Amino acid sequence: MRKDNAIPLASLALWGASLAYVWTISGQPRMADGGLSGDEMSLIEMAMTLAVPLATFASMFIAMRRAYWNGSRFWLFACLLLWPLAYVYALLINRTDLH
């Protein structure tokens, strides 16, 4: 794994881990309404709730920075407006940092 893609890959891993965790606790009584509120969450669940969006924003920043350096306004705005495209751009289209 290249260090240029460590943050987007870690962010996808966090997404996968959080989805798998929610799926495993979906049968618990505290998930009867389909979600967890602050009182129902443990400290680890709260940390994951904050880590996933922060990692997503970091991946968006990396993808937008790469698009800016390459002069691609389309990908810059696409990564800004549609966060899944930031992963596509960072991991499939432009896989390395130039600077």
Image (cartoon, grey):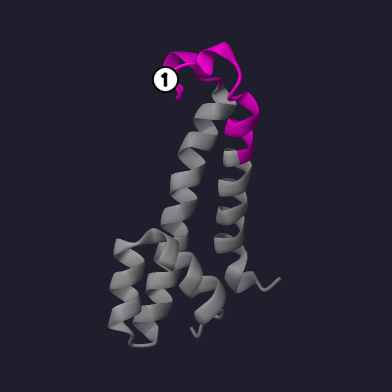
Q: Is residue 58 above or below residue 74?
A: above
Residue 95 occupies quadrant: bottom right
Magenta-drawn stretch contains 90? no
Q: Is residue 8 above or below residue 48?
A: below
Name the residue rendered at 42%, 19% in the picture. 38
Magenta-drawn stretch contains 40? yes
As drawn, is 13 to the left or to the right of 49? right
As drawn, is 77 to the left or to the right of 6? left
Query: The N terminus appears in which quarter of the rendering?
Result: bottom right
Q: Which residue is mark 1?
A: 37
Residue 17 occupies quadrant: top right
Q: Position of residue 31 (x, y in %)?
A: 51, 19
Name the residue rendered at 41%, 63% in the picture. 60
Question: Which residue range is magenta in the image?
Answer: 20-42
Name the residue rendered at 54%, 36% in the picture. 48
Name the residue rendered at 42%, 67% in the picture. 85
Q: Position of residue 70 (x, y in %)?
A: 39, 87
Q: Residue type at mark 1?
A: Ser
Q: Position of residue 36 (x, y in %)?
A: 46, 22
